[in-house]
Image (cartoon, coloured by chain):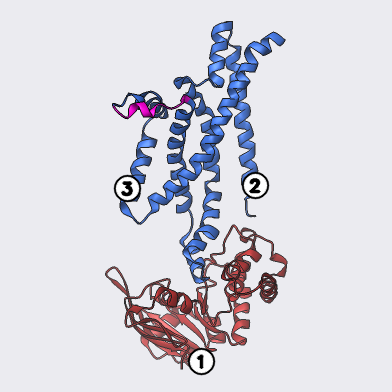
Amino acid sequence: MVDYWNRIIWPMIEGAQMTVLLFFIVILLSIPLGFLLTLAVKSRFKPLSWLAQLYITVMRGTPLLLQLLLICFGLPMIPVVGEYLVFDRFVAACIGFVLNYAAYFAEIFRGGLLSIDKGQYEAAKVLGLTKWQTTTRVILPQMFRVALPAVANESITLVKDTALLYAVAVPELLHFAQTAVNREFTIVPYFIAGVIYLAMTLILTVFFKWLERRYKYE
Amino acid sequence: MALIEVSNLKKSFGNQEVLKSITFSVDRKEVIAIIGPSGSGKSTLLRSLIHLEEIDDGSICIDGEYLVKDGQYAKQTEIRKITGKMGMVFQQFNLFPHLTVKENLMLAPKLRKTESLGEIEKRCYDLLRKVGLSDKADAYPNNLSGGQKQRVAIARALMLNPEILLFDEPTSALDPELTGEVLKVMKDLAEEHMTMIVVTHEMGFAREVANRVIFMDGGEIIEENEPEQFFLHPQHERTKAFLHKNWK
């Protein structure tokens, strides 16, 4: 039993740490970046708005796996500059995930902004709030509240998408599961991996449910 | 000198002329009721006064200062100063749903930073008592009835000590049995000589509380008069037709 633990489960839990690390890095970077993209889309400076929309279209319209392969293996193949674009695999994967998820978060936040009634802006204006005060005190808190369920959804997808690290050979949970399956010739590691993913998404689900209740405003 | 002077105000949305050369004035302490069929431009007129709509031509002068003169708007800082003399209450309340009642009232004065927090809080509770909602200070707007929401909205507007209060159909979104509590608060304000302009469908309120009734139709002021004269002896055919339909 101890042997089983040492050979199979422990490496998988270590692999899960990589999964969790990627998750937090991506969430912490892609949400602010996504929000900046939302602002860029809403910008009155048209070229910036078009650029942001083009970016979102491309990132959402192509597979994440393709983007990861491009960053990990494609960039180094570019003539002349390629040799400066060789990143550590994990760093490269983080960049790919952040760039991709930012596009989704940008759309989520844009949806949140659309849901806010124009009466909110008018009420803020007649109360003498400046544009900045209106945005930070009235609009953004409501936007984040509206976006919360979609952000929760996206976060859970991210936990599962981390399995794509397998394809760019970053040792994470699924990698160790597959190794164990090959070595031990048993399918049990698949189920263990499934349980660990499930545990992670369950924790997230509970956390976001708590956030939604906390900011119910009732 | 009148507190509000509007002259030759014109406003179009695209090709449609919604306000055709409106001229009227309001004296300090007056309560004006603006009535008329929907689409007559009365809300647009009210919203123009506080710069929620930009007019195309004409002048609006508030307390001796031109918000817009012959179609030329004042500088942004001037506009803020002039519109700051007015408060507005909306048909849909427009309370901030993520803030409690108390926070709704205190947000703008806190950001304005002209009084201490203690003073702001004291006035907040005074005003909540005045509108009969002392016990709702920590409630969120979503947990209030429509009538309560609108009373909070009135208190919130009063927090900035406006010289003029504008009401845009304040009871139109309310269940009939809830209009009374809002009208009561407005009546109290009128008795304290607050200058008020009220766009309304409440003929009873207009007749009882207003000093003057303005009837608009098709983007024009058709008739204005003191309430008794207006309701009992309307001069214009369109006024007669409107009253016949809307007031028994």
> Residue at label 2?
A213
Q: Nearer the viewer, mark 1 or mark 3?
A: 3
Per the image, label 2 sits on a secondary structure element best described as helix
Residue B116 in the image, given as x and y percentages of width and height: 66, 72
Q: Identify the residue at image location x=59%, y=57%.
A: B98
Q: Nearer the viewer, mark 2 or mark 1?
A: 2
Parent chain of label 2: A
Magenta span includes A91: no
* Same chain for the residues under marks 3 and 2 in the image: yes
Q: Residue flagged by tag 1: what amino acid is it?
A: Glu
Q: Residue flagged by tag 3: what amino acid is it?
A: Trp
Parent chain of label 3: A
Residue B246 in the image, given as x and y percentages of width and height: 47, 78
Please identify which colour was used for chain B in the image. red
* Same chain for the residues under marks 1 and 3 in the image: no
The label shown at residue B228 is: 1
Q: Identify the residue at image location x=62%, y=68%.
A: B106
Q: Residue flagged by tag 2: what amino acid is it?
A: Arg
Crowd rating for badge 2 (residues with CA inside 10 Å; few <14, some 14–19, many 20+): few
Q: CA distance from mark 2 to mark 1?
A: 54 Å
Give the extent of the magenta segment.
A80-89
Per the image, label 1 sits on a secondary structure element best described as helix
Instruction: Judge whether B154 appears above or below A40 on screen.
Output: below
Instruction: Judge whether A153 appears above or below B186 on screen.
Output: above
The disc, 3 or 2, on the residue closer to the chain's N-terminal end is: 3
Per the image, label 3 sits on a secondary structure element best described as helix
Q: Quadrant of residue A182?
A: top right
Q: Identify the residue at image location x=69%, y=65%.
A: B136
Q: Is residue B236 left or right of residue A137?
A: left
> Residue at label 3?
A50
